[in-house]
């Protein structure tokens, strides 16, 4: 039974536990959108393509390299699996998966369902798209796709447990070696602390191993739809994640062995195990970072992975160091009235402050660059799950930093002195409370990180929202009742489109018919009715090429049941040659560094450590330590800048090969024409020939063109010849030999007026390449 005096404390403890449970549930809840890691970039034939004959194969290119366990299947309109359709990842290009199509496939609409596992970060993803053969009826079959465990609570919790254990395992020896052991006031304290430290080391290494085992189970379940047991051996033997997982386990085992043979009483007496433990602490974050978002980058990958590893190491030394203090040092606070206990706290706090300041500096350095790589803009920070989760993490770090600053500035001064001040006992107890609060908040931060790892980076998520579809919202009327409805046309550009009508309210009768009546009166094009097929509830869909000309189309939506009711609503669809422009500016292009950039980051990290130590050393030693710190930071910055140049040059010179004359090109630029307007098409120009319109000059740079996805680069300059870096550039490709529709890609800025996009051109012959340009904040045509 709780004593009356302790009842308020018990209530506060229960309230704290309840709040922590709510935070855990909220952070581990699945996000409202699907994850996207090895996402479909393009395919040949393209999604929603109408073919005159069955293709021999469907070639799919993805945004990240694929594990061999990635697969694809083919379904007919009824949702039945098409036999003899087999998929394999290309041995020449791991970004490409090919689905062979059996010969003699009858006309109809087919759905390609794919499941990928990224080699870079190990994350799974499902998706599908439809193609049609010999018919314009291209409605997709309903395919039951089971999401991987990343969409639930198990995978984030597994990562959280692994990160908790890893933080303690990485911190125990550095904190013992450089903080606790030198600050021990007497042999009795050393004996007590050694026992606690050894138990802490064993427990955290075991916790890290358990978390890694749970993470392996989650990955195996994602790899195999049949469950984690079926995918366990496949994950271990056939995936990069499995090989890196085995490396994690081996390094953890090596750390356990090194700590077992290290001399905790006199670390310098048996130096080899101690130095081995420090080396393993420095290396252990790498296999974790090699399955992070940083490992998925195509350019600057080595530096990005090292940056992620430094971030993980800095966080572990700080968070794990707090846990070490809470386990090894804080139990002595019961004797705070004794001078030796106050002396121990007075010695430990300044030493740990050096470690904490170093960790904070590394966290800020690596965190800012990592956020630039994965988010890149305020829009991506506010409008994506990744960005919002990152904001939660930053919000939790603020009180953590305040508590750490309180210990560093206030408590440290109160306990400083030899002998320790007589009034130090209350400050020892305050230190215990603040460290306990820091440990609790740090555990929640790691939980947020566990969820963040499984989310789609903000840059990719924002790019996936561009361009938006055309959407009309209206009220269907014409009888005694009205219903709100939304008609979505995707991608909303001239060519093949998906039509989707969603009617609000109660379920419509089973015999309800939906027609979309389209006409283009400006060109005298008559009306055509497009029937929409019911999918589920009050959702009706169709796919067609009726909107094949840019202009203002009259669209009438009719919902009816013959003899019972008829509702209708009319509107105008402004259909352009390209999809609607992005709703917001794209993230700025992040700097990418070559392999030497990793050395620059390490130099800056060492410099931060020297500068952090400057506040705890004797004045006579201050100057050389500060000089070393500033020199290390300066040298690291210089190496980083040098490492950025070769990569930028390689990027800008990647399109210098002369292409064959089979490709015809045209370029258009405008700064004022609205999307709905129809501009006269410019005459074709050869590759490399500048085309000027409205004060902007666009040049399609020479490139090696083949029957495959091609990297096309555009040089954009203004009337003075200066490069233009703040435009929205779109590159569209259309085959002149066969009408396969227009494939449009948003180009990414490379800087210096260059923009690039990967455009699929899967058929030999002549192609028309159209470049459309809009300065930021103005309309695109």
Image: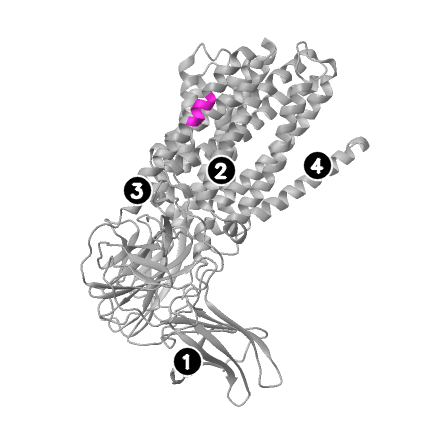
The disc placed on residue 23 is none
Write down the residue under mark 1: 530
Is residue 456 visible in this depiction of the protein? no
Residue occupying the far bottom of the picture: 563
Dot 3: element: helix
The disc placed on residue 367 is 2
Q: Write the start and end of the magenta stretch as one range.
A: 629-634
The disc placed on residue 649 is 3
The nearer-to-camera label among 4 and 1 is 1
Q: Is residue 201 above or below residue 117?
A: above
Q: Is residue 11 above or below residue 284?
A: below
Label 4: few (<14), some (14–19) or many (≥20) C-alpha neighbours in 10 Å: few
Horizontal side of residue 62 vs 216, given as left or right = left
Location of residue 242 (image quadrant): top left
The percent position of residue 703, horizontal first and vertical second, equals 24, 54
Q: CA distance from mark 2 to mark 4?
A: 33 Å
Q: Are marks 1 and 3 in contact (CB under 8 Å)?
A: no
Q: Is residue 111 above or below residue 356?
A: below
Label 2: few (<14), some (14–19) or many (≥20) C-alpha neighbours in 10 Å: some
Is residue 419 visible in this depiction of the protein? yes
Horizontal side of residue 578 vs 665, given as left or right = right
Q: CA distance from mark 1 to mark 3?
A: 51 Å
Query: Which of the two discs, 4 and 1, labels the residue nearer the N terminus?
Result: 4
Location of residue 106 (image quadrant): bottom left
The nearer-to-camera label among 4 and 3 is 3
């Amino acid at each position: 039974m709780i004593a009356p005096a302790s009842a308020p404390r018990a209530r506060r403890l229960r309230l704290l536990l309840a709040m922590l449970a709510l935070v855990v549930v909220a952070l581990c809840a699945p996000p409202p959108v699907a994850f996207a890691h090895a996402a479909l970039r393009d395919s040949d034939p393209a999604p929603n393509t109408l073919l005159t004959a069955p293709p021999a194969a469907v070639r799919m290119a993805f945004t990240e390299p694929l594990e061999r366990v990635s697969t694809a299947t083919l379904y007919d309109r009824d949702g039945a699996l098409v036999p003899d359709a087999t998929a394999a990842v290309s041995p020449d290009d791991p970004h490409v998966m090919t689905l062979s199509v059996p010969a003699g496939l009858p006309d109809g609409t087919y759905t390609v369902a794919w499941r990928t596992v990224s080699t870079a970060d190990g994350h799974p993803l499902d998706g599908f798209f439809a193609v049609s053969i010999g018919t314009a009826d291209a409605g997709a079959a309903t395919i039951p796709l089971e999401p991987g465990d990343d969409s639930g609570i198990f995978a984030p919790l597994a990562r959280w447990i692994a990160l908790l254990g890893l933080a303690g395992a990485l911190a125990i020896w550095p904190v013992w070696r450089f903080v606790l052991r030198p600050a021990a006031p007497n042999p009795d304290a050393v004996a007590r602390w050694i026992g606690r430290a050894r138990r802490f080391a064993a427990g955290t290494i075991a916790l890290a191993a358990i978390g890694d085992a749970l993470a392996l189970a989650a990955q195996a379940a994602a790899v195999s739809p049949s469950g984690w047991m079926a995918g366990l051996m496949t994950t271990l033997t056939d995936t990069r994640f499995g090989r890196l997982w085995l490396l994690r386990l081996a390094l953890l085992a090596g750390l356990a062995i090194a700590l077992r043979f290290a001399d905790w009483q006199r670390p310098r007496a048996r130096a080899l195990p101690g130095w081995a433990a420090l080396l393993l602490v420095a290396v252990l974050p790498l296999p974790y970072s090699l399955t992070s978002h940083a490992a998925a980058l195509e350019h600057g990958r080595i530096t990005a992975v090292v940056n992620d590893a430094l971030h993980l190491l800095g966080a572990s030394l700080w968070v794990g160091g707090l846990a070490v203090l809470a386990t090894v040092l804080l139990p002595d606070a019961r004797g705070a009235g004794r001078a030796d206990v106050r002396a121990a706290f007075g010695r430990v706090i300044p030493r740990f402050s050096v470690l904490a300041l170093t960790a904070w500096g590394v966290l800020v350095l690596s965190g800012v660059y990592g956020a630039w790589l994965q988010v890149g803009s305020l829009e991506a920070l506010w409008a994506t799950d990744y960005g919002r989760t990152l904001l939660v993490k930053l919000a939790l770090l603020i009180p953590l930093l305040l508590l750490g600053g309180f210990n560093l500035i206030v408590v440290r001064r109160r306990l400083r002195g030899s002998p320790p001040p007589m009034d130090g006992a209350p400050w020892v107890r305050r230190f215990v409370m603040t460290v306990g609060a820091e440990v609790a908040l740090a555990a929640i931060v790691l939980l947020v990180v566990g969820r963040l790892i499984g989310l789609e980076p903000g840059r990719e998520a924002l790019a996936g929202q561009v361009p938006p579809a055309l959407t009309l919202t209206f009220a269907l009327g014409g009888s005694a009742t009205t219903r709100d409805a939304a008609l979505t046309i995707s991608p909303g550009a001239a060519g093949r489109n998906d039509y989707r009508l969603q009617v609000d309210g109660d379920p419509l009768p089973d015999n309800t018919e939906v027609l979309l009546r389209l006409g283009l009166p400006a060109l005298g094009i008559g009306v055509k009715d497009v029937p929409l097929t019911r999918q589920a509830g009050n959702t009706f869909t169709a796919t067609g090429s009726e909107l094949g000309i840019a202009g203002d189309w009259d669209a009438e939506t009719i919902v009816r049941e013959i003899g019972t009711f008829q509702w209708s609503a009319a509107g105008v669809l402004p259909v352009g040659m390209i999809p609607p422009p992005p709703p917001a500016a794209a993230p700025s292009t992040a700097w990418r560094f070559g392999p030497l950039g990793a050395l620059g980051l390490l130099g800056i990290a060492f410099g931060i450590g020297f500068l952090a130590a400057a506040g705890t050393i004797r004045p006579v030693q201050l100057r050389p330590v500060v000089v070393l710190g500033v020199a290390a930071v300066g040298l690291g910055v210089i190496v980083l800048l040098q490492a950025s140049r070769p990569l930028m040059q390689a990027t800008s010179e990647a399109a210098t090969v002369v292409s064959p004359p089979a490709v015809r090109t045209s370029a258009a630029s405008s700064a004022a024409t609205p999307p709905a307007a129809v501009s006269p098409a410019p005459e074709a120009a050869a590759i490399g020939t500048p085309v000027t319109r409205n004060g902007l000059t666009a040049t399609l740079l020479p490139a090696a063109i083949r029957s495959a996805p091609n990297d096309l680069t555009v040089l954009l300059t203004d009337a003075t010849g200066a490069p233009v870096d703040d435009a929205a550039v779109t590159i569209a490709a259309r085959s002149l030999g066969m009408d396969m529709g227009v494939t449009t890609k948003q180009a990414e800025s490379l800087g210096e007026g260059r923009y690039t996009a990967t455009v699929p051109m899967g058929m030999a012959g002549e192609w028309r390449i159209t470049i459309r340009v809009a300065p930021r904040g103005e309309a695109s045509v």
